[in-house]
Amino acid sequence: MSPVKPLSRQHWIDRLTAPGEDYELVAGTVWGRPCRVFKNGPGTLRDLYRDNRSEQTFLVYEQERYSFDQVYQRTAQLATVLVEHYRIEKGDRVAIAMRNYPEWVLAFNAITSIGAVAVAMNALWMSEEMAFALEDSGAKLLIADQQRLQRLGRARGDLGLKVLVARPSEPLPNGVADFDALVNVAAATMPDIELTGDDAATLFYTSGSTGQPKGVLCSHRNILSALLNWELELALARAEFELTAVQLAVQPSVLLAIPLFHVTGSHSVMLMSYRAQRKMVSMYKWDVAAAAALIEEESITAFTAPPAMTGDLVDHARSSGHNLSSLVTVGGGGAPRAPDQVKKIASVFAAQPNIGWGMTETNAIGAGIAGQDYLDHPGSTGRISAVMDLRIVDEQGVDVAPGQRGELLLAGPTVFEGYWNRPEANSEAFTGNFLRTGDVGYVDAQGYITIVDRIKDLVIRGGENIGCAEVEAALVEHPDIIEASVFAVPDRRLGEEVGATLFCRRTLEPDAIRQFLQQRIAAFKIPRYIEFSDGGLPRIASGKIDKKTIRASACQQWQLS
């Protein structure tokens, strides 16, 4: 008698999304594009916050602890301040620039609860980068911490911007208000603003292959579709692989060690905690020893971070005496994880590894893989998410056969509207209803996706996207640098580092160049590797700089591969 063939993934997708099921999918449109949408679930992010109020612990930061209900009440107070004191209206942009303080969560929740658009700014940006995003977004108000206020400096006056500062450590200048002073006396009643799932909610900035970062505009429905998709994927994994849900002896919890200004931090860690009633323990910044101590003290059950950070934790766990046995899942995204690290996660922590592939433009949704499935396919990024459609095309835009390489295109309810005030970028990003990801890969006979290359001129350093053109533009501002070519070089811990080959008028020291860049771009964008060319940089027939040859030569010189 032949063995019974396991039911396919598509069988379970059809079953779990059928009429009457919790994750029922129906035909709909998002931003005017046809796609499958969830019939059930919260209609807006405000509904998500309100419907999941409880006395369970939600947010922990150092010695501070807040329940879901306390966060909601505090959010309502801030929302009242935004509406009554700052006259923020539906559609206004309000920027957030700070580290992972509780006030970041309150600001995001309050802004999105009143129909305004939360502009998530990279906390590592320098003054010029901050000023660009504030001006580009047309932000009406900035909610920042002390360090970000200082970093913005004189640009604040040039922008004529109102600022609300959390946790001030110095006297505040004129026109800048203290967060607590206003919020503590405000009414804890959420303003009654009409909202729909199709209203704009967020503007995250992402580095692209050309020029300055671009604002990615997303709606409540985009984001909620991402959250429900992750829930559906968990249900699918349990059904397909006949897994039993883990019964925890403690409240589910997650360590927030990645920045909230990335969609992985804000969506998969923070927002996913609501319906799961999951405790979120926030770190100011990454420190592996401090992270291990928190995991042990707080009985953390989940940790999601780029491979560089999960690799740090694996190494630390093997050399320290910390008990990290509470970990049930160790997730990742932002960059590929080495197959060897996948196995180490399972053996060192006895935890289930997982990873996802997506973009800011898709609210981190694209493909995913977890558990034994991941251990069996450690080089893959998984199978296409249940709510998404995938095409793989050649350079002419024609679909390729299974197993052949091409650019990955995505469509679905999590795909953003478009780049803020960048119609030319939108025309390049979309082909019909499909978003061009810029990633090159293939799908095998079982439906597993493997990413092998990228089309976009990017460095992905520890999960941070760095646009090569942006770094090149900063370099050629130096009066003695004539030409610059910036590219990715392999790095064992971070995946990639920033390299640069320069043609200069006179001899320059690499450290002097890095010092020149410090006031212009964030530290993580500054080239670690710098080499110099005796003549003009080599070019291809079209006249463009021959980056492929430059990169190969530089990496050989630095003995990198």
Image (cartoon, rainbow, N blue to C red):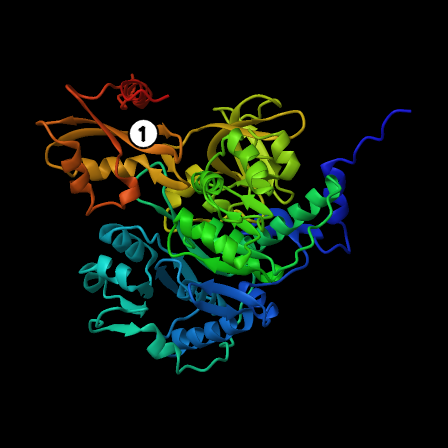
Q: Nearer the viewer, residue 234 or 456?
A: 234
- Does residue 482 appear anywhere in the picture? yes
Q: Residue at the location (43% across, 40% down)?
A: 312
User: Going by the picture, which residue comes out furthest to the right?
Assistant: 1
260 up-or-down from 552: above or below: below
Which quarter of the rendering shows the N terminus?
top right
Number of marks in the rendered image: 1
User: Going by the picture, which residue comes out furthest to the front?
Assistant: 321
* Three-letter code for the amino acid on which mark 1 is drawn: Phe
Q: Quadrant of residue 485?
A: top left
Q: Quadrant of residue 224?
A: bottom right
Q: Residue at the location (22% across, 69% down)?
A: 170
> Label 1, on which residue?
487
Residue 379: x percent and y percent?
A: 55, 29
Q: Nearer the viewer, residue 368 or 192?
A: 368
Residue 474: x percent and y percent?
A: 21, 40
Residue 86: x percent and y percent?
A: 35, 74
133 up-or-down from 483: above or below: below
Q: Residues within 10 Å of mark 1 (few under 14, many from 20)?
A: many
- Does residue 28 appear anywhere in the picture? no
Which quarter of the rendering shows the C terminus?
top left
Q: Nearer the viewer, residue 331 or 115?
A: 331
Residue 142: x percent and y percent?
A: 32, 64
Q: Residue at the location (16% across, 36% down)?
A: 511
Q: Residue at the location (67% across, 28% down)?
A: 446
From the viewer's perspective, is 23 left or right of 548?
A: right
Q: Nearer the viewer, residue 201 or 145?
A: 145
Give the secondary structure at mark 1.
strand
29 up-or-down from 50: above or below: above
